Image (cartoon, helix red, strand yellow):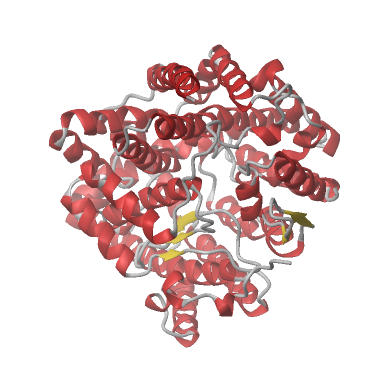
């Protein structure tokens, strides 16, 4: 039976270089202690912020220094644990870092309430009295905007201290699904028994052998169903934690609380789900075409990921995937390309799956470190798109951190998915231009359609599920395994229509979506692909002017409001228009796919 490699067996060149963060753990311990020593220094400013502009500036600078160092300590510990979730030493580092993070948040929690205890004109006068505070003007304006939702110093400190406890559902879910939960073996198309994992499931669901797809689908979801009570309890705890913080900060709903820090109107959320629901006929048409091209009497959920075009091999070793992605991103210009080349040479990426490694993919790092990327690369075209996606995040971080001070050195999650999905759009455009082969064009068009299905339609469905479970919890309903599964089954039936058989296993799929533990995150994949579709078109048609606007957007960090940054780049997300434009792209691709399928059939 094929088993996963241990972490110690992974070649160094395919692992990320965390030694650039800390050459050894003694240096991590020194910074851990340094952060701990800053905590009482921060607390000493409590009650003194109205003394003078100089005092306020000193406090804000110390806060930034403390949080920046804490971020470095935290990402090192968490990324070490992600390498091997079964490693007790790394578990301990991560737990200690999380506890210290809660302490630092508590130690600085007084700043907002204390400043908001002053009249607005006094805050503006204080800024004018100390030139160094001008850099913090947008931060202070944003604080004033949030005045209705900032509580007293005592309450803010208590809320910060509660974070260590309220993150328990997420931590429990992560340990269960990444370390403790084991999947059965599945026989592959060559009759080899293969230990199933999250990453191998993603590979098997694209298998041409329908028996393999079905077995993997049933084995994975059957395993999750065996833990349905525990998983429902953890998701319920996460949703109720979201509601607790929303009510503690005087928000009407958890949705408002999640969107307000980025100054995103809730109408953006409802515009997305409403526009998608009005156009579900496009998705029904697409899955109908899939059913026909696969030659199936019945289309099941385990048939949704296999390529619709047979006899096209599009596997890419990692080195080839990197080359293709770099070529695809050349329209973003020399500055972008040079920075990416330097990152690849600096081992930003942890490439392959190993035993007990965190599943999926992400871009991480902190203000004072390189951006880092976790992959579980299997060599499929989907993995190449994931590579391009995570590079988009990391390059966004790179340009932001080089351009902004720490206080603005991050970006909202709303714009985060724009940079990643834009790279996917450019990759698709590049791949389609590289071939005149009709079958390959059909294969690539299929892949692009899949990107829209999984990123626009599927994430909008996830967004509806999140809204449904939070709304029910806010109304006092219990989020039982049956309720969660019934809601999820009904959404799948509506989104996919009568063309897809409602397999029993799909009802438990909610249990394997880690993003549900990040309140109202997933809708931003759908808004991100909508904005990215518009921006990539501008870059490809306008060239340099659009590239300059886009790089200015990447450099913006959080120095301006999210919606303003996107307007600078050339997209207005306050209206349904970007989502409608993305659906128009999907419709054109679907037209192309139908035409290509006829041409291929005639040629075959």
In the image, residue 75 lies at what x, y percent? 48, 66
| Res. 151 image quadrant | top right
Asked if one can make out residue 44 in the rendered structure from this viewpoint, the answer is: no
In the image, residue 64 lies at what x, y percent? 36, 62
Determine whether, in the image, residue 256 is placed left or right of residue 588. right
| Res. 405 image quadrant | bottom left
Residue at 32 percent of width and 32 percent of height: 436
- Closer to the camera, 420 or 424? 424
In the image, residue 128 lies at what x, y percent? 19, 48
In the rendered image, the vertical position of residue 433 relative to residue 43, given as above or below: above
Asked if one can make out residue 573 in the rendered structure from this viewpoint, the answer is: yes
Determine whether, in the image, residue 531 is placed left or right of residue 194. left
Determine whether, in the image, residue 196 is placed left or right of residue 598. right
In the image, residue 9 lies at what x, y percent? 57, 78
Image quadrant occupied by the N terminus: bottom right
- Closer to the camera, 294 or 115? 294
Spot the residue most to the bottom: 26
Residue at 40 percent of width and 31 percent of height: 441
Residue at 17 percent of width and 55 percent of height: 131
């Amino acid at each position: 039976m094929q088993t996963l490699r241990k972490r110690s067996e992974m070649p160094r060149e395919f692992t990320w270089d965390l030694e650039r963060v800390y050459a050894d753990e003694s240096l991590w311990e020194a910074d851990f202690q340094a952060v701990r020593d800053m905590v009482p220094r921060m607390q000493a400013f409590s009650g003194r912020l109205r003394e003078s502009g100089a005092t306020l500036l000193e406090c804000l600078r110390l806060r930034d220094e403390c949080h920046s160092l804490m971020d470095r300590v935290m990402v090192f510990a968490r990324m070490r644990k992600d390498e091997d979730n079964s490693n007790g030493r790394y578990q301990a580092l991560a737990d200690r870092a999380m506890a210290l993070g809660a302490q630092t948040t508590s130690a600085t929690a007084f700043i907002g309430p204390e400043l908001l205890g002053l009249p607005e004109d006094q805050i503006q006068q204080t800024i004018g009295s100390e030139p160094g505070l001008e850099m913090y003007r947008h931060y202070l304006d944003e604080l004033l905007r949030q005045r209705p939702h900032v509580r007293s110093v005592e309450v803010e400190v208590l809320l910060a201290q509660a974070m260590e406890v309220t993150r328990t559902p997420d931590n429990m879910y992560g340990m269960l699904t990444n370390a403790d939960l084991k999947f059965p073996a599945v026989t592959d198309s060559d009759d080899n028994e293969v230990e199933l994992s999250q990453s191998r499931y993603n590979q098997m669901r694209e298998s041409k052998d329908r028996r393999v797809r079905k077995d993997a689908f049933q084995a994975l979801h059957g395993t999750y169903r065996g833990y349905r009570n525990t998983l429902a309890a953890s998701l319920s705890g996460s949703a109720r934690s979201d509601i607790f913080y929303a009510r503690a900060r005087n928000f009407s709903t958890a949705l408002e609380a999640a969107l307000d820090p980025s100054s995103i109107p809730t109408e953006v959320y409802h515009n997305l789900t409403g526009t998608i629901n009005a156009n579900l006929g496009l998705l029904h048409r697409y899955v109908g075409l899939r059913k026909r091209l696969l030659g199936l009497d019945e289309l099941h959920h385990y048939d949704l990921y296999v390529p619709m075009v047979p006899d096209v091999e599009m596997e890419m070793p990692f080195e080839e995937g990197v080359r293709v992605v770099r070529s695809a991103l050349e329209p973003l210009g020399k500055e972008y390309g040079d920075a990416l080349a330097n990152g690849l040479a600096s081992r930003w990426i942890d490439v392959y799956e190993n035993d007990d490694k965190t599943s999926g993919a992400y871009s991480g790092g902190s203000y004072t470190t390189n951006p880092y990327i976790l992959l579980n690369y299997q060599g499929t075209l989907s993995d190449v798109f994931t590579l391009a996606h995570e590079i988009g995040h990391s390059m966004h971080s790179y340009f932001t951190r080089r351009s902004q001070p720490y206080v603005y050195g991050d970006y909202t999650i709303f714009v985060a998915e724009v940079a990643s999905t834009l790279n996917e759009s450019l990759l698709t455009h590049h791949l389609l231009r590289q071939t005149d082969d009709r079958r390959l064009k059909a294969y690539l068009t299929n892949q692009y359609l899949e990107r829209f299905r999984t990123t626009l339609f599927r994430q909008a469905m996830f967004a509806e599920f999140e809204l449904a479970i939070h709304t029910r919890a806010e109304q006092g309903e219990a989020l039982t395994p049956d309720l969660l599964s019934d809601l999820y089954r009904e959404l799948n039936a509506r989104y996919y229509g009568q063309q897809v058989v409602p397999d029993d296993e799909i009802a438990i799929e909610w249990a394997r979506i880690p993003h549900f533990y990040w309140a109202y995150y997933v809708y931003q994949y759908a808004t991100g692909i909508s904005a990215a579709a518009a921006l990539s078109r501008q870059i490809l048609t306008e060239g340099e002017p659009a590239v300059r606007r886009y790089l200015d957007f990447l450099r913006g960090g959080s120095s301006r409001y999210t919606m303003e940054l996107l307007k600078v780049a050339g997209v207005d997300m306050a209206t349904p228009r970007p989502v409608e434009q993305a659906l128009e792209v999907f419709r054109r691709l679907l037209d192309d796919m139908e035409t290509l399928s006829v041409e291929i059939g005639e040629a075959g």
